[in-house]
Amino acid sequence: MLSLIRTLLDGASARAEDGLKDRFAIDLLAQRIRDAEAGLAAAKQTLASLIVRQRAEQAGLDQLDRRIADLETRTRSALAVNNETLAEGGATAIAELENEREVRRATVQSLGEKTLRMRVSVERAHRRIVDLNQGMISARAIDAERKAQSRLNRSIGRTASLNEAEELLARIKEGSDPFEEAGILDEIDGELRHEAIRDRLAEAGHGPATRVRAKDVLDRLKSQN
């Protein structure tokens, strides 16, 4: 029982978390991009420090090369005049400098590899952030459209209300014309009072006319002339 309750609580918590993520997705995305940009700035600073160290070590290595070359020239000169004491001192100094040079070379190589890896990482992160910022523009537009649609739905009602309104409108349009109905009712009432048959008999010349006709008007006007 406890396991079941714990599972239900975990499920409810997960659904609530998903709901919050959906509701504040744009804000969360913007914050993640800011975090990524801060991380990229820190990575750039680290890369700059590595480049400075690499250049300094390379400058030190170049200086060692020049010192060793100078000592070798001087030592060979001492050997040329059979000055063994000076030549031995020069050889000792050269050996120490060459050992130091090997250490510096290894350091320069290691810094170069680290710099290359960091540069690749920085470039990759930069491209991803650019893509995220471009995607953010689309996401904001989509979110604005959804919010506008949501406000529209709240203002005019849900789909069911719209459907019902459309059905009522269709029924009104399909309904009969009240003026036409009134005319038909008058005709029916006239027939019920036998007025229609009386008018038809009068039109056929059986008995006096029940209404003034255009022919009657013309005859009257002619007789007046």
Image: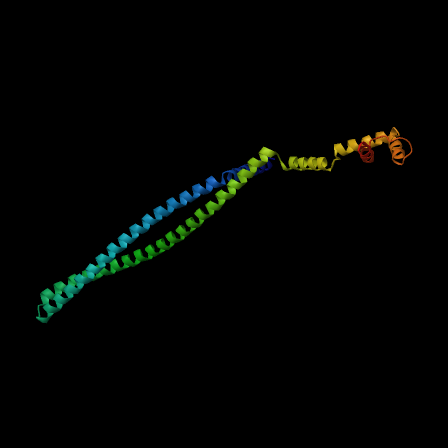
Q: Is residue 2 visible?
A: no
Q: Quadrant of residue 218?
A: top right
Judge whether 187 appears above or below 52 on screen.
above
Judge by depth and name the residue closer to the eye, 75 or 60: 60
In the picture, the quarter occupied by the N terminus is top right
Q: Quadrant of residue 200?
A: top right
Q: Residue at x 82, y 36 (%)?
A: 215
Residue at the farthest right position: 206
**In the picture provided, is 53 more to the left or to the right than 166?**
left
Q: Quadrant of residue 9?
A: top right
Q: How is the image coloured?
A: rainbow
Residue at the farthest front position: 225
Q: Is residue 24 visible?
A: yes
Judge by depth and name the residue closer to the eye, 133 or 44: 133
Image spot of residue 18 (x, y percent): 53, 40
The number of callouts visible is: 0
Judge whether 47 appears above or below 17 on screen.
below
Q: Residue at x 70, y 35 (%)?
A: 168
**In the picture provided, is 197 more to the left or to the right than 18?**
right
Image spot of residue 174 (x, y percent): 73, 37
**In the picture provided, is 113 more to the left or to the right than 7?**
left
Image spot of residue 214 (x, y percent): 80, 35
In the picture, the quarter occupied by the C terminus is top right
Judge by depth and name the residue closer to the eye, 89 or 220: 220
Residue at the farthest top position: 193
Image spot of residue 76 (x, y percent): 13, 69
Judge by depth and name the residue closer to the eye, 159 or 211: 211
